Image: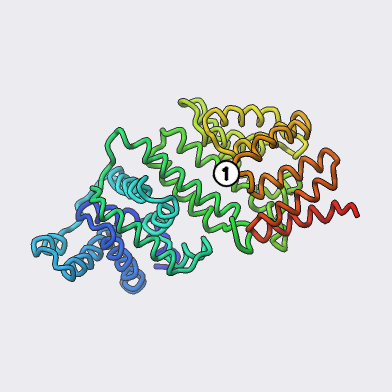
Amino acid sequence: MSADRIEDLLRRLAPQVLGAVVRRYGHFDLAEDAVQEALLAATTHWPRDGEPDNPKAWLIKAASRRLTDLLRSEQARQRREDAVAQWTLPEQPPAQQYDDTLVLLLMCCHPSLSPASQIALTLRAVGGLTTAEIARAFLVPEATMTRRITRAKKSIKDSRMPFGMPPEAERAERLAAVLHVLYLIFTEGYAATAGPLLQRAELTAEAIRLTRMVHVLLPDDAEVTGLLALMLLTDARRPARTGADGSLIPMAEQDRTLWNAGAIAEGLALVADALPRSVTGPYQLQAAIAAVHDEAPSANATDWPQIAALYELLLQLSDNPMVSLNHAVAVAMTDGPQAGLDRLVELEKDERIGDDHRLHAVRAHLLEMAGDRAAARESYELAARRATSIPVQRYLNGRANRLDVR
């Protein structure tokens, strides 16, 4: 049995095993430790002994034994120890296996946890990433990430939250939290907020993998479908976003032959499937905008009036300054740079984005389009000072230097 085959199998089974153990016995924090040790044991035994007939049952049995030891060390009742030690996995239909994974996701994304804790716990418990890997991805010390995950698990333990689907009245809110966390993971991977790299492919890949999982669990949810479509259509451009030296290449200058045609085709099919199904939500609209970009054979052929109209619909659903900023760009591309600059005046008063490098970068671009090179250079330099991503800083400084008016 190859190492790659074992890694893929364990990655797929890990959330199902953790979900099964937590559903049966509770103790999320101890169960997570027990499952991790069971996975480590599998990497030792399976290459030597071969893949067991029922890998999931093998893992749950190993995790249950380890959980017995952990509970014993905390002086758990003998009855619980015996039950855990003797339990064998009953056969379950595939739907129940998937239910455990979905419940685990909902638990990790409980609204009482901060977004940072939700992300960390989701990547650890459902994604199977190590604490060191998560810390590396978000550019924080491993000790910091360890504390964050520990606090999140303690919050779940202290809440005495039962393992199961939340009440019907809470499900929409809890699912919205799951989708938001997956979106944040993808966004950080696609446009890293800090550090030497523009993008982190491992994070975008993990976000897409987890969103595919939710789509399998909830195939009729139009917003889940929309989020998956948005990720695929956006990530399809990744191969053309950076030069050989890692420098940023804006969409208008990208070689579109490098875009992932397969991901675009899948994303377009998902958009077509999601939009007519129910009331249109924000992820569906964002996916539709991404689809318009991806379908354009060139930057000049982009249907900017349609994009502007879609952003107007999105603004009715979301008081998000980034949506307003993107709408200003679409208006500028449709009605001229001054129309876009006029819309930035109000945005500058919004403290959520008024000092964000992206607003200054958009203003610089529109000023450059309008022919005001001196003001554009000043805005590019200000945007570069505000940016925390090194490739973005270099790109913005490069744009400013091109406009040297001295």
Q: Residue at x 50, y 46 (%)?
A: 183
Helix or strand or loop: what does disc 1 sit on? loop
Give the x, y percent position of residue 247.
Answer: 71, 59
Q: Residue at x 73, y 48 (%)?
A: 254
Relative height, residue 237 to residue 279 (above, below):
below
* Disc 1: CA contacts within 10 A as few (<14), some (14-19) or many (>=20): few
Give the x, y percent position of residue 248.
Answer: 70, 55
Q: Amino acid at mark 1?
A: Arg
Image-based side of 100 in relation to 71, left or right: right
Q: Residue at x 60, y 52 (%)?
A: 191
Instruction: Please name whichever residue, 105 or 86, is drawn nearer the observer in this view of the structure.
Output: 105
Relative height, residue 149 to residue 341 (above, below):
below
The quadrant of the image that shows the N terminus is: bottom left
Q: Residue at x 36, y 41 (%)?
A: 174
Image-based side of 91 in relation to 119, left or right: left
The answer, for residue 303, to whether it is visible in the render is no
Residue under label 1: 352
Image-based side of 184 in relation to 43, left or right: right
Which corner quadrant of the image does residue 272 belong to?
top right
Give the x, y percent position of residue 198.
Answer: 64, 57
Instruction: Please name whichever residue, 333 or 222, is drawn nearer the observer in this view of the structure.
Output: 333
The quadrant of the image that shows the C terminus is: bottom right
